[in-house]
Image: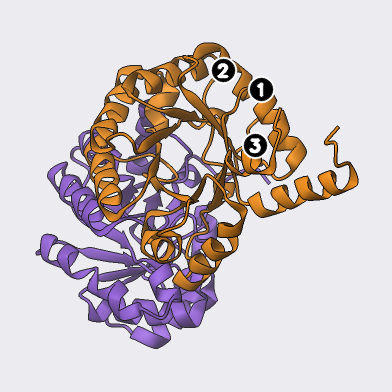
Amino acid sequence: MIGTESELAGMIDQTNLEMGASEQEIADFCARSVPFGFRAVCLLPNQVGAALSVLRGTSIGLAACVSFPLGLDRWEVKAREAAELCDLGVDEIDMVVHTGRAREGDLSWVEREVAAVRRAVALPRLLKVIIEVPVLPAELVGPVAVAAEAGGADLVKTSTGYKRLGIRATSAGDVRLLRSLLSPTTGIKAAGGIRSLGQLEEMVEAGATRVGASRGIEIVEEWRLRRAGDPSGC
Amino acid sequence: MGSGSDQLEGWPDLVAPTRGELGAAFRALRQAGVAAVAVDPAEVALARQLLDGFPAPVVALISAPLGAMTSGSRMAQAELALADGADELAVAVDPSLVRSGKLGRAVAELSPLRRLAEGRTLRVICHLALLGPDLGAEAAAGAVDGGADLVMTNSHFDGEVTGEQVAAVRRRVGQRIPLVASGGVAATSQAAPLLLAGATRVAVGWSGFYGEPSP
């Protein structure tokens, strides 16, 4: 149950992963996001400079994706990209596992690559690991999530949510499954097709501790409208 | 105008392929006799092994499909791909820099890769479908000036290549270098008009070599 607007915004990674977005478009996106107090803005690696010019000095964190969106990199490259992004000033890393090895059930591969990136992302920076649930065989979702956790993930993230991959949206069932298997100290980020307050609440009820959304502003505005219509929040 | 296998390249189009699926794809490409095989960087070593004895070059996709990697990781990716046995590199130019009016910087980022790939073919992916024919052709011209040996129109996420895109690049860079029409080509039967428009070769999704897709 989300009690306040700041609690809501504090769960949202306001996301823009548009390929080829210009520096000005990213700066504008970040500037629009600042007043809403999101937990973080989540972007592609080449947008970090433009984002920091706006976000530095604000309370909003900056998250950047690694090996996005396919995860088809060697672990050395993922670790290098994460380290470079941390040096630039990123607060959180959203890495994609090698989706092909994950689909094979090569759990030691997944754990090893997550551990390699973990070494490059020292706390208090957070490491989120995207396991791309929609492409995994159902019986492998749990094992892959547990391997990511064993490798050092702070949060396991359901999906890239990347439309160009043509994959289904994240479901509350995906989140419930992860919640039932992962340690209570491991967070869950639901991402992929979450476009409304109702969908966000469904994910949180299922156990998500963070939500990635490209429509974070609209979701908070929906919350405000609801509150305006019913100040008790009931 | 038809399209022979020497005018076709294999291009990854599977989401999260397993090693078994990659093996099947490479067998089909070998059987088809394609002129080059593009692969994601983590799979170069496997491709090298499975394509042993097949003469077509293995092309490692660098900073693809989005062209959004940091400079250091892009270099690390290229170095490892070459160490794993890649014959050529296909680097996606940073489309955000191009759209930000910083084509010069986007081209300058190619320089270390050009030096690294000394003596090998350096391809540059120019995102024509994303940038539009005019800006995309500008990016292609910049890439040629920056040392590209070959231009590819699109990454596999940009959108579909068209004859208009191919013609735009040809108008801008002339016949100086080979041009591969790439992006969204799912069947070998789609190649002919792109070759007619001026492409040297056409990159067809791996699945296109298993047989024509169902209507």
* In this rendering, position of residue B149 left or right of residue A2: left
Residue identified by numbered label 1: A206
Please tell me whether mark 3 or mark 1 is closer to you in this view.
1
First in residue order: circle 1 vs circle 2? 2
Q: Which chain is purple?
A: B
Residue identified by numbered label 2: A179
Q: Residues within 10 Å of mark 2 (few under 14, many from 20)?
A: many
- Spatial separation of the CA atoms under disc 3 and disc 2: 18 Å
Give amino acid for label 2. Arg
Residue identified by numbered label 3: A169
Q: Residue at point 70% right, 45% down?
A: A195
Callout 3: SS: loop
Depth check: give the residue in front, A62 or A110. Answer: A62
Callout 1: SS: helix
First in residue order: circle 3 vs circle 1? 3
Q: Colour of chain A?
A: orange
Do the residues indicated by labels 1 and 2 lie within the same chain of the protein? yes
Depth check: give the residue in front, B125 or B171. Answer: B125
Q: Residue furthest front?
A: A232
Whether residue A191 is situated above or below residue A50 in the rendered picture: above
* In this rendering, position of residue A159 left or right of residue A113: right
Give amino acid for label 1. Ala
